[in-house]
Image: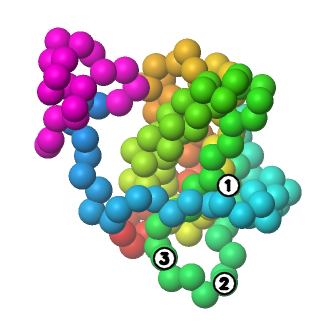
């Protein structure tokens, strides 16, 4: 495990919102939802679960010939979250959360959208991680042994 730059230069400081070790992902960055039609499809036809710090929307991936077996994630932080700096911070936290929880533990045949709420800015990363794991359990979206990885 390789130490992050912050941990190398400030070894006594606790790094907030992330592990001191950077995980080395074998598959590279996560697949992202970027088109408006995908976000609209999930908001209209997907299942939703509102949590304290964010909302999650989930829908099966459409059969459009894509063979990628990795879950796709879309992130949203509206102006209700705050100014541009706060919205960007919220999106970065959601992306890190998605990489650590959805990429490893969620069913790969689904599309996920995480919508930030203002409370996400003050929450610890551990709280957010537990909340997302609880949401996946509630929606019955945990990766099963039969799901290929």
Q: Which residue is mark 3?
A: 68
Q: Are marks 1 and 3 in contact (CB under 8 Å)?
A: no
Other-residue count near label 3 (Cα within 10 Å), few / some / many at <14 / 14–19 / ≥20: few
Label of residue 6 in the image: none
Residue 36 occupies which quadrant of the picture?
A: bottom right
Q: Is residue 3 above or below residue 15?
A: below
Q: Residue at x 48, y 23 (%)?
A: 127
Relative horizontal placement of residue 93, taking residue 29 as reference (left or right):
right
> Quick one: 8 or 2, which is closer to the camera?
8
- Is 24 a magenta residue? no
Between discs 1 and 3, the one toward the N terminus: 1
Q: Which residues are magenta?
A: 1-18
Task: State the mark number for residue 64.
Answer: 2
What residue is drawn where x is 48% and y is 76%?
68
In 3D space, how far apart are the residues under numbered discs 3 and 2 (Cα atoms)?
A: 11 Å
Q: Which secondary structure, mark 2?
A: loop
Residue 64 percent across, percent down from the top left: 66, 84
What is the CA distance from the residue labelled 1 to the residue labelled 3?
17 Å
Q: Disc 1 designates what residue?
A: 58
With respect to residue 50, does 52 lie above or below? above
Mark 1 nearby-residue class (10 Å; few <14, some 14–19, many ≥20): many
Q: Is residue 44 above or below residue 9?
A: below
Is residue 105 visible from the viewing direction of this image?
no
């Amino acid at each position: 495990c390789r130490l992050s730059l912050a941990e190398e230069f400030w070894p006594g400081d606790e790094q907030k919102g992330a592990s001191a070790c950077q995980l080395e992902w074998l598959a590279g960055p996560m697949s992202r939802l970027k088109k408006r039609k995908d976000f609209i499809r999930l908001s209209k036809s997907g299942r939703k679960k509102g949590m304290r710090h964010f909302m999650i929307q989930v829908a099966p991936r459409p059969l459009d010939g894509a063979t990628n077996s990795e879950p796709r994630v879309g992130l949203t932080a509206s102006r209700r979250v705050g100014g541009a700096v706060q919205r960007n911070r919220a999106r970065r936290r959601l992306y890190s959360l998605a990489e650590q929880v959805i990429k490893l533990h969620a069913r790969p045949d689904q599309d996920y959208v995480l919508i930030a709420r203002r409370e996400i800015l003050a929450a610890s990363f551990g709280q957010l991680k537990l909340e997302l794991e609880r949401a996946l359990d509630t929606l019955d979206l945990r990766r099963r042994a039969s799901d290929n990885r």
